[in-house]
Amino acid sequence: MTAALKEVSSDELLERILSSLDDDKAEEVVTIDLRGRSAMADHMVICSGRSSRQVAAIAEKLMERLKHEYGIICKTEGKDAGDWVLIDAGDVIVHVFRPEVREFYQLEKMWHPSGSAAGTGAQPVKA
């Protein structure tokens, strides 16, 4: 049974998302703090799955967990193709890529200030 919509902070939601991605063996997980940089969300998470099947499974499990635990119905794009799935969980936006597609789009670089590696807000997640 789905839980009623539960009030959850963006940081708590981020931690649950990272835990779900770890459970499903997502690779090269990076978080980007968007607070003060974008009105669309507080955090962005970018990760990879080894195949189209794993990308779709990671996304599906994450959406199921957020719906069950917090009552959050996520909006998604790209789940049917399995190359890149965007999951809008409100305060946290998640991108799950196949490695080749992630390399092509290079989303992490879009959020780095030009000419600066330090203080970018992009943080690899340590397992």
Image (cartoon, helix red, strand yellow):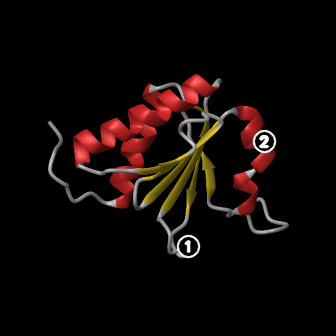
Q: Quadrant of residue 103?
A: top right
- Per the image, label 2 sits on a secondary structure element best described as helix
Label pair 2/1, CB-CB below 8 angstroms = no
Q: Which residue is mark 2?
A: 103
Q: Residues within 10 Å of mark 2 (few under 14, many from 20)?
A: few
Q: Is residue 62 above or below residue 112?
A: above
Is 68 placed left or right of 11 in the picture?
Answer: left
- Type of amino acid under label 2: Glu
- Type of amino acid under label 1: Ser
Q: Quadrant of residue 116?
A: bottom right
Give the residue at x 50% y 75%.
39
Give the residue at x 52% y 25%.
25
Give the residue at x 56% y 25%.
54
* Residue 28 picture location, percent across and down: 64, 35
Give the residue at x 29% y 51%.
72
Is 95 placed left or right of 118 in the picture?
Answer: left
Is 44 placed left or right of 60 in the picture?
Answer: right
Depth check: 17 or 122 in front?
Answer: 17
Is 114 placed left or right of 53 in the picture?
Answer: right
Quadrant of the frame with the N terminus = top left
* Residue 124 picture location, percent across and down: 62, 44
Q: Which residue is mark 1?
A: 38
Gap between marks 2 and 1 measured at Cα: 23 Å
> Is there any visible trace of residue 118 in the rendered image?
no
Q: Which residue reaches farthest right?
A: 115
* Residue 48 picture location, percent across and down: 63, 34
Query: If you read the primary sequence from the N terminus, does the residue marked by circle 2 or circle 1 appear first?
Result: 1
